[in-house]
């Protein structure tokens, strides 16, 4: 029995979130540079996205680049940003073909201009797709998210939009 035929379509989760990890270690183990692992990681992303769409998963979230990842060597960050742009360009047709809407979370304003531009372009082009939502978490961090949420709540209390009791 194939793996796909053993999956019960009624029992599938509505949302799958994946933390991308191990690209660098995988490449090092094979005697290659870490960036080779990232290049291959993009191929796994492509297969995962298509497979999830085929199975009928409604939401797929990929944690692709954390706030901490900005501390990596400059060349690695640059390669990751380039891979992001080329993947977005390459995947556009597949997203349209499979009616996948692209979404992004994180501090997108920290991304280099050319990355943000390509990202927003694909988000806009795919905004009416309905089969699956693919969310990329970019420049994203849980600590950062908590700090931002707390700031927003403080702001609303300060401006009498919500009361402390209603937090
Ligand atoms: C985790 O491996 C992977 C990353 C931090 C970056 C992944 C991002 C890309 C491949 C860019 C393209 C993204 C998309 C969504 C198309 P790691 O470097 O943490 O590996 P390690 O745990 O072995 O150090």
Image (cartoon, helix red, strand yellow):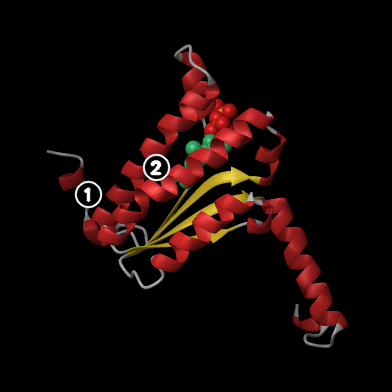
Per the model, the C-alpha gap separating discs 1 and 2 is 20 Å
Which numbered marker is on residue 158? none
Residue 101 quadrant: bottom left
Most foreground residue, 162 or 133: 133
Whole-percent x and y of residue 86? 44, 43
| Pointer 1 with pointer 2, Cβ within 8 A | no
What is the tally of numbered marks visible in this picture? 2
Looking at the figure, which quarter contains the C terminus?
bottom right
| Quadrant of the image occupied by residue 126 | bottom left
**In the orientation shown, which residue stands out farthest toward the front?**
114
| Rendered view: 146 above or below 68 | below
Residue ID for mark 2: 45
Residue reaching furthest bottom?
160
At 41% from the left edge and 30% from the top edge, which residue is drawn?
40
* Mark found first going from the N terminus, 1 or 2: 1
Residue 9 visible within the image: yes
Residue at the limit of the structure toward the right, as seen here:
158
Q: Is residue 38 left or right of residue 145?
A: left
Residue 47 image offset from top left, x and y in percent: 31, 42
Label disc, if present, on residue 7 of the rendered structure: 1
Image-based side of 12 in relation to 82, left or right: left
SS for dot 2? helix
Confirm or reject: label 2 Cβ below 8 Å from ligand 1.
Answer: yes
Q: Name, please, the residue furthest toward the left.
A: 1
Determine the residue positioned at 30% across, 66% down: 131
């Amino acid at each position: 029995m194939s793996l796909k035929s053993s999956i019960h379509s009624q029992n599938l989760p509505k949302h799958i979130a994946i933390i991308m990890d191990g690209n660098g270690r995988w490449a090092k183990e094979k005697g290659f540079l870490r960036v080779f692992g990232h290049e291959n990681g993009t191929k796994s992303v492509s297969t995962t996205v298509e497979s999830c769409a085929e199975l009928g998963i409604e939401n797929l979230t990929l944690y692709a680049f954390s706030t901490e990842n900005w501390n990596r060597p400059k060349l690695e960050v640059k390669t990751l940003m380039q891979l992001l742009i080329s993947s977005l360009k390459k995947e556009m047709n597949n997203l349209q073909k499979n009616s996948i809407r692209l979404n992004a979370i994180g501090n997108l304003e920290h991304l280099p201009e050319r990355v943000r531009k390509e990202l927003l372009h694909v988000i806009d082009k795919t905004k009416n797709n309905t089969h699956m939502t693919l969310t990329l978490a970019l420049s994203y961090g849980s600590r950062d998210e908590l700090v931002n949420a707390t700031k927003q709540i403080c702001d609303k209390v300060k401006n009498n939009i919500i009361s402390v009791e209603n937090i």
